[in-house]
Image (spheres, grey):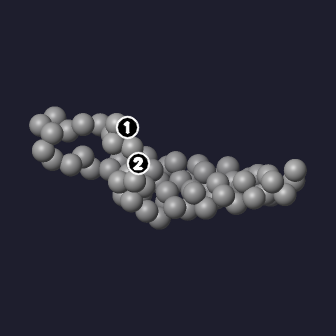
Amino acid sequence: MNLLWQVGSVGVVALGVAYLAFPARIHAFGFEFLRRPSPDGSEKSAPPVWLYRGIGALLVFMGLTRLA
């Protein structure tokens, strides 16, 4: 079971690093219905980069504390 927790923690850290490194790609990869629609519908919404980087930092922190 300990090995399973370690593998899961490494996966969480890898996902967090992806969120930190590529926030715009993560936003583009997500589901369309989760994004806020633009008022006129013609312009693209700017990805909330700070939110994705915050999620990434939290995932890295959680994974590293579990590995320690």
Residue type, label 1: Leu
Residue type, label 2: Gly
Q: Position of residue 19 (x, y in %)?
A: 49, 57
Q: Could you tell me which secondary element the residue under label 1 belongs to?
A: helix
- Neighbour class for label 1 at 10 Å: few (<14), some, many (≥20)? few
Q: Could you tell me which secondary element the residue under label 2 belongs to?
A: loop
Q: How many marks?
A: 2
Q: Is residue 47 left or right of residue 58?
A: left
Q: Is residue 26 left or right of residue 4?
A: left
Where 63 sits versus 32, above or below?
A: below
Tell me the CA gap for discs 2 and 1.
8 Å
Q: Is residue 26 left or right of residue 42?
A: right
User: Which residue carries the number 1 mark?
Assistant: 34
User: Which residue carries the number 2 mark?
Assistant: 30
- Neighbour class for label 2 at 10 Å: few (<14), some, many (≥20)? few
Pick the front one: 24 or 50: 24
Where 43 sits versus 36, above or below?
A: below
Outermost residue toward the bottom?
21
Where 46 sits versus 17, above or below?
A: above
Write the residue at 24% across / 46% down: 45
Where 58 sits versus 11, above or below?
A: above
Write the residue at 79% across / 52% down: 5
Q: Position of residue 26 (x, y in %)?
A: 42, 55
Q: Are marks 2 and 1 in contact (CB under 8 Å)?
A: yes
Outermost residue toward the right?
1
Q: Position of residue 20 (x, y in %)?
A: 49, 60
**Camera sees residue 53:** yes
Write the residue at 79% across / 57% down: 6
Q: Is residue 22 left or right of residue 64?
A: left
Q: Position of residue 10 (x, y in %)?
A: 70, 60
Write the residue at 20% across / 38% down: 38
